[in-house]
Amino acid sequence: MNDLDVWHDDRLGFKEIGHTFGNLVRSFDRSRVISIEAGFGRGKSFFRERWAKQLRAEGEVVIEIDAQRSDHSGDPVVTFLGALMDALPAQESDKILKAWATGQKIAWAGAKILASVAARGAGEEAVGALQKRLSSDGETSALDELLVEFSKGASKALSAQVSAQMSAERVRLKEMPEQLEELRLALADGKNTSRVIVLIDELDRCHPEYALALLEAMKLVFNQDGFVFVLMVNADHLERLAGHRFGSVGEGERYIDKFVDLRLQLPFSDEALSNATADLAMALPLANPLGDDPEFNVERAAKLAAVIAPKSGLSMRQIEGVLVKVDLVLRCYKDEPIDCALLVGLAFKDATPSNGTSGLPFNLSKLLPRVQLEPIRAANLEFTDAEHMNPNLRREKVRALNYEVRDNFSEFLTLTNERLGVPHDSRYEDCVKVFKYLAPDYIPRHQRMLDAIQALQVSTDIS
């Protein structure tokens, strides 16, 4: 896999950071725990996925753990061992498991861990899966029976057993390091490295108890030479979880510092956010623009989105959600004449930033003046009693309104009468076409399409 394959869809400028961080982890021979920190929706998972591919292409042994998916197991030891074992060929992992069992090394954490790892799962179902796997040759050995029986007996009280035995000095100082060393050597066999890099993502989306237990297991049990742990984490959120669980730490201290040797951040500039947003918006499938004027096309919508994005207070994930909604409108209403830039502006206006506020924190009309063309503007054409009595006053008012249209809404003057909603072959002043015929349904029609798609989408937390 070449470099372009790995970072081909990088819109946030992470490629160079990936190479820099890669050089960093390759400089470590001893155990290290590193955090790569960014807020929710700031590209941590994207970076982790692409960086893992890059590191593997460069010959590193990389283990990826989605902590949120493993949260159901309740036992971080199962999570870590399962991930390490899963990276081995089945034949190699079977060999190691049977060697451990034969050497009576399974008592340190209960056979359910062994069963869960071997069966690539966790819970009661692991027992049956293990029995089927170990007996696939048609014979059930004494070892097979031993493992299954231990699994059944240990399944209900594993958490307490793990907690107690993880703290035992013999386990922590002798048996566990020996087994991890076996795993590390097996994973690195045939490679130009002896290092195992463990990338842990979504830790800040786990249940607090599991997230903190995983950190403690990582530091107390799995912290030995040859392993480099990298946490992709929202440190502020993790700190709040720890504070709720353990209370506040001393002044100037942070809970995460107890577990992390080196804290790094994933840069996320306004420029990168703008560029990423523009790239996403340029892919919008506009089939029927409101008119031929460039103001109504995808390029104009992309430029608007790029300016709005860093001002909006939305995360990258939320911005993607906004553009997905616009994308769905354009697909579902492909026969409707659509002002793509207006649709994008209204979609951003409807979005709710992660801080809970609603609406854009700035005046959208300064970026897209035609968002002022609300139905109420039709009232501009009403004449006062004095204007009804005086033709000169009426003409002066119409002239002023025509100037306003030409100054602020000139793009509408390129539209056909059909698109303006003007009766066929009728001749009207510019202001009448825009304010009387277009304005009443221009913004409401686009908003109705957005609202209809919103009603069809499943509500999700995209913060």
Image (cartoon, rainbow, N blue to C red):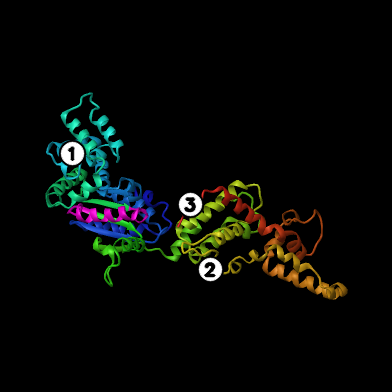
Q: Nearer the viewer, residue 9 or 183?
A: 183
Label 3 belongs to which residue? 460
**Furthest residue to the right?**
389
Q: Which mark is residue 96?
A: 1
**Furthest residue to the top?**
138
Q: Nearer the viewer, mark 3 or mark 1?
A: 3
Label 2 belongs to which residue? 361
> 245 left or right of 134?
right
Residue 144: which quarter of the image?
top left
Q: Are marks 2 and 1 in contact (CB under 8 Å)?
A: no
How packed mark 2 is, by other alpha carbons closer than 10 Å (few <14, some 14-19, many 20 or more), is few
Please name the residue shown 55% across and 51% down the image: 327
- Whether residue 129 is visible, yes or no, is yes
Disc 1 is placed on an element classified as helix
Please name the residue shown 75% across and 67% down the image: 379
Q: Nearer the viewer, mark 3 or mark 2?
A: 3
Disc 3 is placed on an element classified as loop
Give how far apart the Cα atoms at labels 3 and 1 are.
42 Å
- The quadrant in which the C terminus is found is bottom left
Disc 2 is placed on an element classified as loop
How packed mark 1 is, by other alpha carbons closer than 10 Å (few <14, some 14-19, many 20 or more), is some
> Within the magenta stretch, is there residue 219?
yes
- Residue span colored magenta: 201-227
Q: Position of residue 88 (x, y in %)?
A: 24, 40
Q: Position of residue 367 (x, y in %)?
A: 58, 67
Give how far apart the Cα atoms at labels 2 and 1 are.
58 Å
Name the residue type under label 1: Ile
How packed mark 3 is, by other alpha carbons closer than 10 Å (few <14, some 14-19, many 20 or more), is few
- Whether residue 291 is visible, yes or no, is no
Q: Earlier in the sequence, mark 3 or mark 1?
A: 1
Q: Position of residue 76 (x, y in %)?
A: 27, 49
